[in-house]
């Protein structure tokens, strides 16, 4: 009798253990499966009505933005239009703030967070800028609306270079990355030219393991992809990925190619990127800048040699932040660039330039 009772106990305990292990195994393989599904690029599809991404933030360092009551309820996805209407009327700043309802939807510095639900990631949108006010107003009018409809938590940074030195887009973007991180923890960084306006609300700026190239098909090119290694206009990275690239080169002045240089860094480091599933952009009109092809090729020629020493880790003496201004629609980071120091670095790599001005 005692033996039979003992046997029954062992049997029951074994069944419980086997059942428990079975549940654990099924749960793990489900998690593995969903991680794979969401791993690379976190874009909504129609089936995913609720954002199911990991809500745990990697860190909660001090942050300048107002704290809200934490919400564990993930934001529900709004219906996003595949083709949206672009708003391109010219408004003055006050009217623009009014039409965007800035006093209610934005905290100073152009920061937004959905109310009553948690957005999965915090996004830093970084716009390299000088002297393109008409473009900036149109971009902000469109971008704030799109990001808010996507239920994003984000801040917009306009990094403006002081006049007097030639424009240096790579350095300016690196500055945006460093200075945004100093203000708050961001999960994703989007570098956004001021003249690119997305044509789809579904073109989201979440980041995954790999970089995303958004502005691949422009209206001005009849939406054709000009070349496959195109890597300019609008790009999104996670923090680690951009740090592994060592950011952009700081050595290109206004003639471009810092984006081709970045593409090479990515390739050499065997990192990947994905084109956005909604890559159509309208390019806003602006004055054409002179291109200095010879100068640009001199620097581009030795980009593999420079990639680990020219970038995020060599910016110390290259710029100064003149002011940080929390405007209603964006944070303006106004900077001066030390051209002489950049020329010294170029010389160190055996590159001598005539002054691009
Ligand atoms: N840019 C700017 N002021 C300038 C030159 C460039 O603000 O004087 C910024 C701006 O964000 C712009 C980006 O750099 O969208 C790319 O420059 P541009 O539009 O001149 O390049 P392209 O049209 O030749 O791609
Ligand atoms: Mn342009």
Image (spheres, grey):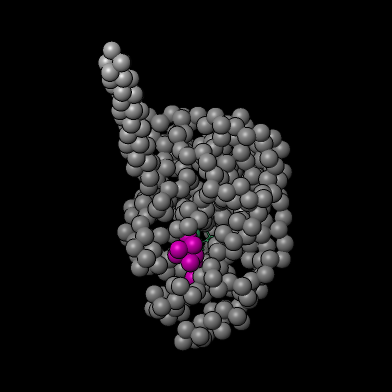
User: Which of 218 and 237 lies nearest the eye of the viewer?
Assistant: 237
Classify 73 as above or below 210: above
Residue shown at 50% from the left, 74% from the top: 310
Q: Is residue 93 above or below residue 10?
A: below
Q: How many labels, in total?
A: 0
* Magenta extent: 242-249
Residue 91 visible, this orientation: no
Residue 206, percent across and down? Answer: 47, 45
Q: Quadrant of residue 5?
A: top left
Percent position of residue 83, x then y: 43, 37
Quadrant of res 319:
bottom right
Quadrant housing the N terminus: top left
Task: Give the prevailing secondary structure in the magenta stretch.
Answer: loop
> x and y percent of residue 347 in the render?
51, 86
* Residue 352 visible in the picture: yes
Q: Residue at x 71, y 66 (%)?
A: 322
Q: Quadrant of the C terminus?
A: bottom right
Q: Is residue 330 magenta?
A: no
Would residue 6 be found to the left or right of residue 219 on screen?
left
Task: Tell me: 43 left or right of 91.
Answer: left
Q: Is residue 244 magenta?
A: yes
> Closest to the observer: 127 or 209?
209
Q: Identify the residue at the far front of this view.
A: 2
Q: Is residue 176 left or right of residue 213?
A: right
Residue at x 32%, y 59% (from the top left corner): 228
Residue sitting nearer the eye, 164 or 330: 330
- The residue lying furthest to the top in this view is 1
Residue 108: image x %, image y %? Answer: 71, 46
């Amino acid at each position: 009798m005692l033996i039979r009772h003992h046997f029954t106990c062992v049997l029951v305990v074994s069944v419980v253990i086997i059942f428990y292990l079975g549940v654990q195994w099924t749960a793990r393989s489900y998690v593995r499966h969903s991680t794979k599904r969401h791993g690379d690029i976190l874009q909504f599809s129609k089936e995913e009505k609720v954002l199911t991404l990991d809500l745990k933030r990697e860190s909660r360092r001090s942050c300048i933005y107002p704290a809200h009551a934490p919400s564990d309820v993930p934001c529900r996805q709004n219906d996003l239009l595949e083709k949206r209407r672009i708003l391109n009327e010219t408004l003055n700043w006050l009217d623009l703030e009014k039409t965007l309802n800035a006093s209610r939807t934005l905290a100073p510095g152009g920061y937004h967070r959905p109310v009553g639900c948690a957005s999965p990631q915090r996004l830093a949108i970084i716009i390299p800028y000088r002297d393109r006010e008409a473009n900036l107003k149109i971009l902000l009018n469109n971008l704030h609306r799109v990001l808010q409809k996507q239920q994003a938590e984000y801040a917009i940074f306009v990094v403006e270079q002081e006049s007097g030195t030639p424009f240096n887009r790579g350095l300016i973007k690196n500055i945006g990355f460093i200075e945004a991180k100093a203000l708050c923890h961001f999960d994703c960084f989007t570098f956004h030219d001021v003249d690119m306006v997305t044509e789809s609300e579904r073109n989201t700026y979440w980041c995954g393991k790999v970089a995303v190239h958004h502005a691949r098909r422009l209206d001005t090119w009849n939406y054709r992809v000009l070349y496959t290694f195109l890597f300019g206009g609008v790009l999104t990275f996670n923090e680690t990925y951009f740090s592994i690239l060592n950011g952009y080169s700081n050595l290109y002045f206004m003639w471009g190619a810092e984006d081709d240089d970045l593409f090479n860094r990515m390739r050499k480091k065997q990192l990947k990127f994905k084109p956005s599933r909604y890559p159509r952009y309208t390019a806003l009109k602006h004055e054409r800048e002179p291109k200095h092809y010879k100068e640009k090729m001199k620097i581009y020629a030795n980009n593999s040699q420079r990639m680990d020493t020219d970038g995020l880790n060599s910016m110390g003496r290259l710029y100064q932040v003149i002011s940080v201004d929390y405007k209603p629609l964006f944070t303006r980071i106004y900077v001066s660039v030390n051209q002489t120091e950049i020329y010294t670095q170029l010389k160190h790599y055996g590159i001598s330039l005539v002054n691009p001005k």
